[in-house]
Image (cartoon, rainbow, N blue to C red):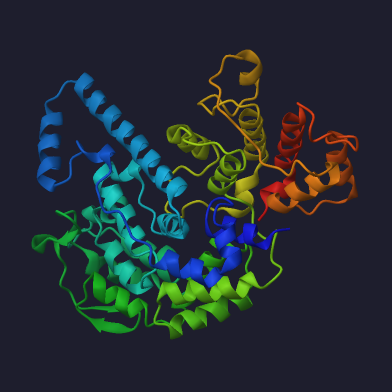
């Protein structure tokens, strides 16, 4: 098994970075942390409303519009969101150092704010870009900034949180899901936090407090008494004893272990506190220390890693990213649209019987040189429509070897540990008399590769 390939999948989405990681992991991390960010507006958002004035004008127009016009607007916004997904997937596929996008995706699933609820593509993009720009920054400061995004205050209904008529959603999730976790606060803290957040609503560029809706009452929050705003709440939260552990547990689960030990969570959490909640040194410590351990097979691949690994191995260039987004949605990883505020659960949820079947069907499609489409998770499509659009696929392998050396090569690349029975299955596909110079040799090795991708072992990293 190739350890650099293992970590290329964990810190990215394919095997593309394995050579750099093998050569110098610390250099890979430093370059990733220093990577530049493209701040240019995605083309998909050119005609989308961006300011509160734009949105008010659109709302006023739609009030008097006929049902056809309203339906057309909704369709256009849904199409814009589909284009935004494709834009992000293109970034993931083309970034030389994908760790920033991997971390952006982590924060995206931590500070959930879905398009389905927010309904403003530009706000969803702003939220996503904020996570990208602060991916390796300070956890406390990022939390403050997230609370001031239009997407978050809309998603968690803080636009309905006003003096005398509080909505506790944002206050609750700030404590429960974003920072401390259940059991480290009281219901009174939630109620008082909601008062401090009252009046924080949508504005141009970011969320702002509206004076007529603010509640300036003196409150007690996690043991501190005073008049607080959103920044004050975050500062108080980050003084709490248990603040580091929820996020370090989630980071370990996102990158390495579906079930990290409590000892590891506490060990890295205590270090995180010492570093004043700076993400970069925490990630460096986790990755460099866990890299040295034999910890392969402790995590089920998420759909992003699964599909981009296939693309890379099969040398598929310029895949249709809208179709990739559809595949992710079918797999339960719909970008910008998690099922709820808790986000994707991951772990065993990435390998239900239905998801496993879909993965096998997509592997069949790609290995047969057929493009994924909206019916592409069904292998019957291959039989019923032989004219389905074709794509070029090419699997690289050592043509100087024999059947056993080629099996070993692919097992190393695909991170396989196989027992005797599975090894025999592979040797039945690529038999002892296999001739690498035979005209059909590529197809034979491709059949072996396809079989390997359908094994449960391929689903693990």
| Residue at screen point 35% across, 58% down | 132
Quadrant location, the C terminus:
bottom right
| Residue at screen point 57% across, 74% down | 288
Q: Is residue 297 above or below residue 63?
A: below
Left or right: where 306 falls relative to 444: left
Q: Is residue 96 above or below residue 444?
A: below
Depth check, front residue: 21 or 371:
21
Quadrant location, the N terminus:
bottom right
| Residue at screen point 50% across, 37% down | 317
Q: Position of residue 257 (x, y in %)?
A: 62, 63
Q: Position of residue 247 (x, y in %)?
A: 47, 69
From this viewpoint, is residue 234 visible? yes
Depth check, front residue: 3 or 19:
19
Q: Which of the 4 image quadrants contains residue 448?
A: top right
Depth check, front residue: 82 or 281:
281
Left or right: where 457 falls relative to 358: right
Q: Position of residue 400 (x, y in %)?
A: 78, 43
Q: Which of the 4 image quadrants contains residue 165?
A: bottom left
How many numbered marks does the figure carry? 0
């Amino acid at each position: 098994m190739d350890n650099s390939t293992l970590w290329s999948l964990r810190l990215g989405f394919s095997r593309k970075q394995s050579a750099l990681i093998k050569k110098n992991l610390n250099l890979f991390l430093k370059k990733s942390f220093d990577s530049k960010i493209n701040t240019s507006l995605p083309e998909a958002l050119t005609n989308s409303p961006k300011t509160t004035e734009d949105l008010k004008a659109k709302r006023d127009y739609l009030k008097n519009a006929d049902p056809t016009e309203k339906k057309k607007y909704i369709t256009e916004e849904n199409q814009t969101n589909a284009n935004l997904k494709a834009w992000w997937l293109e970034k993931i596929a083309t970034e030389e150092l994908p760790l920033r996008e991997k971390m952006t995706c982590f924060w995206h699933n931590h500070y959930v704010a879905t398009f389905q609820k927010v309904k403003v593509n530009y706000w969803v993009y702003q939220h996503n870009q904020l996570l990208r720009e602060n991916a390796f920054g300070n956890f406390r400061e990022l939390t403050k900034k997230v609370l001031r995004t239009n997407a978050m205050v809309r998603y968690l209904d803080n636009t309905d949180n006003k003096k005398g008529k509080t909505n506790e959603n944002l206050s609750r999730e700030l404590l429960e899901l974003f920072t401390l976790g259940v059991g480290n606060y009281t219901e009174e803290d939630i109620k008082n936090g909601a008062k401090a957040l009252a009046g924080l609503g949508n504005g141009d560029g970011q969320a702002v407090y509206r004076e007529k809706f603010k509640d300036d009452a003196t409150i007690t929050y996690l043991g501190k008494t005073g008049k607080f705003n959103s920044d004050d709440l975050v500062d108080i939260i980050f003084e709490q004893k248990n603040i580091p552990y929820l996020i370090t547990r989630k980071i370990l689960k996102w990158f390495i272990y579906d079930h990290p030990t409590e000892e590891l969570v506490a060990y890295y959490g205590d270090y995180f506190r010492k570093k004043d909640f700076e993400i970069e040194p925490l990630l460096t410590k986790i990755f460099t220390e866990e890299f040295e351990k034999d910890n392969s097979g402790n995590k089920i691949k998420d759909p992003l890693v699964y599909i981009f690994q296939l693309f890379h191995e099969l040398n598929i260039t310029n895949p249709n990213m809208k179709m990739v987004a559809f595949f992710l949605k079918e797999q339960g990883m719909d970008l910008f649209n998690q099922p709820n505020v808790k986000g994707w659960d991951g772990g065993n949820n990435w390998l239900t019987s239905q998801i496993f079947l879909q993965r096998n069907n997509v592997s069949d499609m790609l290995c047969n040189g057929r493009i994924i489409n909206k019916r592409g998770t069904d292998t019957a499509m291959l039989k019923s429509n032989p004219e389905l659009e074709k794509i070029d696929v090419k699997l690289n392998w050592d043509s100087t070897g024999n059947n056993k050396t080629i099996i070993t090569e692919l097992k190393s690349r695909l991170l396989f540990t196989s027992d005797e029975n599975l090894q025999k299955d592979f040797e039945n596909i690529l038999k002892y008399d296999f001739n690498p110079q035979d005209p059909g040799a590529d197809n034979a090795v491709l059949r072996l590769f396809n079989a390997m991708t359908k094994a449960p072992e391929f689903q693990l990293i």
